[in-house]
Image (spheres, grey):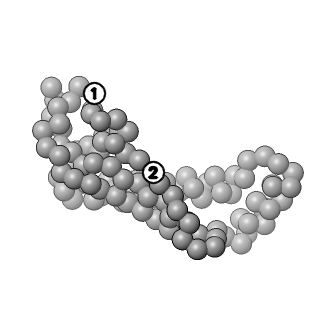
Amino acid sequence: MILTTGEFVAHKKIVKTLGLVRGNTVRARHVGRDIGAFFRTIIGGEVSEYTKLIAESREQAIDRMIEEAKGMGANAIIQVRFSTSGIMSGSAELLAYGTAVFCEEE
């Protein structure tokens, strides 16, 4: 599956636009990670516990978006974007979305 943030796929011709696809996940913070993150905010530096959590969430959302696109018969997703929103205290949604298309060689 080809993913791009652009409006087209290089060296490919979009022959069919299949529609909006999305994948999301809602993740909650973990108490164990919060303790480590708390100390990191005092001494400074990257909060690697949360960096890892967000990276895992992003990959899961992408995987779910790709599965939806495959179900529609797509071989590429263009205009890929990410969005996050708070759901409740300590949890957030990560949403990946784009336009599923079918491409052929030019």
Quarter holding the C terminus is top left
Residue highlighted by disc 1: 10
Q: Amino acid at mark 1?
A: Ala
Nearer to us: label 1 or label 2: 2
How crowded pointer 1 is (Cα within 10 Å; few <14, some 14-19, many 20+) is rated as: few
Residue highlighted by disc 2: 82
How crowded pointer 2 is (Cα within 10 Å; few <14, some 14-19, many 20+) is rated as: some
Quarter holding the N terminus is top left
Q: From this viewpoint, which residue is outermost toward the left?
A: 15
Which of pointers 1 and 2 lies earlier in the amino acid sequence? 1
Q: From where the camera sits, is residue 1 visible?
A: no
Is residue 20 toward the left or the right of residue 54 in the image? left
The answer to whether 38 is drawn above or below residue 99 in the figure is below
The answer to whether 4 is drawn above or below residue 63 in the figure is above
For the residue labelled by badge 2, is the local secondary structure a helix, a strand or a loop?
Answer: strand
Instruction: Name the residue located 27 percent from the left edge and 48 percent from the top edge.
Output: 99
Tag shown at residue 80: none
Instruction: Name the residue located 55 percent from the left edge and 52 percent from the top edge.
Output: 55
Q: Amino acid at mark 2?
A: Phe
Is residue 76 toward the left or the right of residue 92 in the image? left
Q: Quadrant of residue 11?
A: top left
Q: CA distance from mark 1 to mark 2?
A: 22 Å
Determine contact: label 1, label 2, CB under 8 Å: no
Residue 61, horizontal then vertical, whole percent: 43, 58
Residue 57, horizontal then vertical, whole percent: 51, 58
Q: From where the camera sits, is residue 23 visible?
A: yes
Residue 72, horizontal then vertical, whole percent: 19, 56
Instruction: Name the residue located 34 percent from the left edge and 35 percent from the top edge.
Output: 6
Is residue 50 toward the left or the right of residue 54 in the image? right
